[in-house]
Every structure is written in structure tokens, then in C-alpha cells.
């Protein structure tokens, strides 16, 4: 971890929980795999496990391909979270155990609320543009929503906030009185930001929320400090705006929300509260219970790894 700007004096305390003041902390991605696709994982990192309710962030692409299908994730389960798929280019087909099927294109929200349990697959379609570039995120569900029935939403039209120097597309949650049609269960924002070439965008933020920004392409500076690709910049709380600028134009992802009040336990594809819940979900998946098959999927199910729970944000 390196600090881009002077951080709050209680930086160590910030490292394990939401920072009670403005900060700019840089967290470089680590390389991981999603099926056969190499990805850069921005969340969780050891020092920064959740930002608002956002508990997982993978970045993949941009890549071009002639043969094969780079997004190739076989049937696997989720509980206690929402998955968000967001593309900058290319396409993905989502199928799930509710029978939902959606062809996701750039600028469209693929939002799956796992609730008490769902199975899904994500694949590059046979007919494709030969490109793939995007992010996948998870949102932790609060206790009041995590046992609900699973559901799936494909939102093709999302609100945009026109700002001096750029534009924000509201993926999930709300910004400047614009609210995404995607179901949100706690106070949050997920937005794609465009900063126009040679301009400065002043982005409105919720004062009591924490936020982070990931540069997706182009060049960008946060409060006039240049930032790197594949690095998550945590901004802390107590900001009502932040200044983003670009010489050649930039796209970036904003995630944030009110600091998540519950201690979550994240293991494999599950978000829960106790090791017993995780173990039960694992047994259910391995035993072919709770998580139905995906009707459109004729491939295998991804086996659960051995159970070694890792606490997230321990109290
Ligand atoms: Mn998944």
C-alpha cells in the first residue's frame, strides 16, 4: 500500500475499517483467475475488505480474441450478495437457476440478487465482437435482505448525471438525485464516470459515505495527483465532492456507500455471517441441494474448495 497524498493520522485504524476522514490510499490489484480468464482483483484486499457494501471487484480486459470464449464461468452458487456485471466492450451471456437469460452489452447493468441461494453461469456468447473489457462486482446484502428469494435484473437504461467536465452513469444506488433502477438494499453508489479531455470534473459525493475510484482507461488525476490503472484509490469519508481531471479523457469506476454496519464473512462465492452458515452452504452445493441447476446450462458445476473460512473485517 502506498499513500498518494497525506492521509488521516489514524491511517492504521483506517486500514481495517472505514476511514473517519478524507484519505487517498492506493491499493494495486493482484492477479487472479476467473475460469480461464486472467483478471486483476481490486477487492477484497487485506487492508481494505469492503467499501460501503461493495465487497468484491474484478477487472478484466481490454482483450481481443479470434477463437475461443474468454468469459467461461461454469455453474456456481452464491448466497448473501448481489453480483454486478458491467462491460466497457464485448458481451456476456448470463444464465441462472431462475431461468433468466440475458445478453449483456456495454452500458447495461446485469444485477443478480442471490438472497438465500442461486446458481449462475457467465459466458462469452458464440456470436461475439471478439472483444472483452469490463468489471465484476459484488455487493454484500444487509441482514434484512440476505435471506430473500433470489432475483435477476437486466437494466438497459440507466440514469446519467451531466456534470461540468464529464458525465456519470448511475449503475447502482444514487447520485445527485438520480437513482439506478437496479434494486439496492443499502445506501450505496456505483457509477461509471467519463472525464472529458482537458477538463476537470467535480463529482458530488455523500458526505458520510466512503468511496473509491478505479481508472478504467485513459489518464486521470484525483485532486491533481496522477493515478495508475489497475489500482483502487480509497477516498475515505467526509467529502462532499472530489475533483477528477484528465488530459486525454478518462473512464473510471466509482464505488461507495455508507460504511457497512455488519461484520460479514466471505468465503468462495458466499457472503454470510458465521462459519456455520458458510459450511452449510458448501454442503448444500456439494450435495446438490438448495442451489438448483441452470436450465440453459449443460456443462458441469464448479466444485467448492475445501472449507477454510477467512473472517472479513473482524470485530
Ligand atoms: Mn458468480
Image: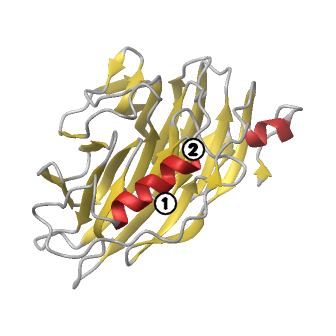
- Residue 70, given in percent of the width and then of the height, sits at 30, 75
State the residue in front, 66 or 93. 93
Examine the image and state in which quarter residue 284 appears: bottom left
Q: Secondary structure at mark 1?
A: loop
> What residue is drawn where x is 38% and y is 74%?
35
Q: Is label 2 within 8 A of ligand 1 (CB to nearest ligand atom)?
A: no
Q: Position of residue 262 (x, y in %)?
A: 59, 30
N-terminal of the two: label 2 or label 1?
Answer: 1
Separation of marks 2 and 1 at Cα, in angstroms: 14 Å
- Evaluate whether residue 294 shows in this view: yes
Label 2 sits on residue: 274
Q: Quadrant of residue 212?
A: top right
Query: Vertically, is 5 above or below 219?
Result: above
Is 297 above or below relative to 243? below
User: Which of the pair 279/196 is nearer the observer?
Assistant: 279
Report which residue position mark 1 lands on.
268
Q: Position of residue 30 (x, y in %)?
A: 61, 66
Residue lying furthest right in this view?
Answer: 9
Q: Is residue 66 left or right of residue 51?
A: left
Above or below for 255 versus 293: above
Task: Tell me the residue at 27%/69% (across/down).
Answer: 131
Residue 275 image offset from top left, x and y in percent = 57, 50
Residue extending furthest toward the bottom: 67
Amino acid at each position: 500500500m502506498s499513500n498518494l497524498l497525506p492521509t488521516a493520522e489514524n491511517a492504521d485504524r483506517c486500514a481495517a475499517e472505514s476511514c473517519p476522514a478524507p484519505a487517498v490510499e492506493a491499493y494495486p490489484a493482484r492477479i487472479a483467475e476467473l475460469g480461464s480468464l486472467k483478471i486483476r482483483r481490486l477487492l477484497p484486499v487485506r487492508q481494505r475488505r469492503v467499501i460501503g457494501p461493495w465487497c468484491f471487484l474484478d477487472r478484466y480486459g481490454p482483450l481481443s480474441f479470434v477463437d475461443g470464449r474468454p468469459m467461461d464461468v461454469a455453474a456456481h452458487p452464491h448466497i448473501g450478495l448481489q453480483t454486478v456485471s458491467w462491460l466497457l466492450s464485448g458481451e456476456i451471456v448470463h444464465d441462472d437457476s431462475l431461468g433468466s437469460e440475458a445478453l449483456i452489452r456495454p452500458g447495461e447493468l446485469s444485477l443478480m440478487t442471490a438472497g438465500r441461494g442461486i446458481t449462475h453461469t457467465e459466458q462469452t456468447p458464440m456470436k461475439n465482437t471478439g472483444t472483452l473489457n469490463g468489471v465484476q462486482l459484488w455487493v454484500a446484502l444487509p441482514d434484512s435482505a440476505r435471506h430473500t428469494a433470489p432475483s435477476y435484473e437486466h437494466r438497459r437504461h440507466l440514469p446519467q448525471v451531466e456534470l461540468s467536465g464529464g458525465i456519470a452513469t448511475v449503475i447502482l444506488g444514487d447520485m445527485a438525485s438520480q437513482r439506478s433502477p437496479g434494486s439496492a438494499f443499502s445506501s450505496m453508489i456505483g457509477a461509471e464516470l467519463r472525464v472529458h479531455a482537458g477538463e476537470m470534473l467535480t463529482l458530488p459525493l455523500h458526505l458520510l459515505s466512503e468511496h473509491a475510484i478505479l481508472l478504467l482507461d485513459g489518464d486521470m488525476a484525483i485532486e491533481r495527483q496522477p493515478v495508475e490503472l489497475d489500482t483502487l484509490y480509497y477516498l475515505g469519508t467526509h467529502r462532499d465532492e472530489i475533483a477528477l481531471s484528465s488530459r486525454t479523457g478518462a473512464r473510471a469506476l466509482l464505488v461507495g456507500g455508507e460504511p457497512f454496519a455488519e461484520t460479514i464473512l466471505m468465503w468462495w462465492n458466499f457472503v454470510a455471517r458465521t462459519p456455520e452458515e458458510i459450511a452449510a452452504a458448501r454442503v448444500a452445493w456439494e450435495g446438490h441441494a438448495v442451489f438448483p441447476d441452470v436450465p440453459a446450462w449443460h456443462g458441469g458445476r464448479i466444485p467448492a474448495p475445501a472449507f477454510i473460512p477467512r473472517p472479513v473485517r473482524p470485530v
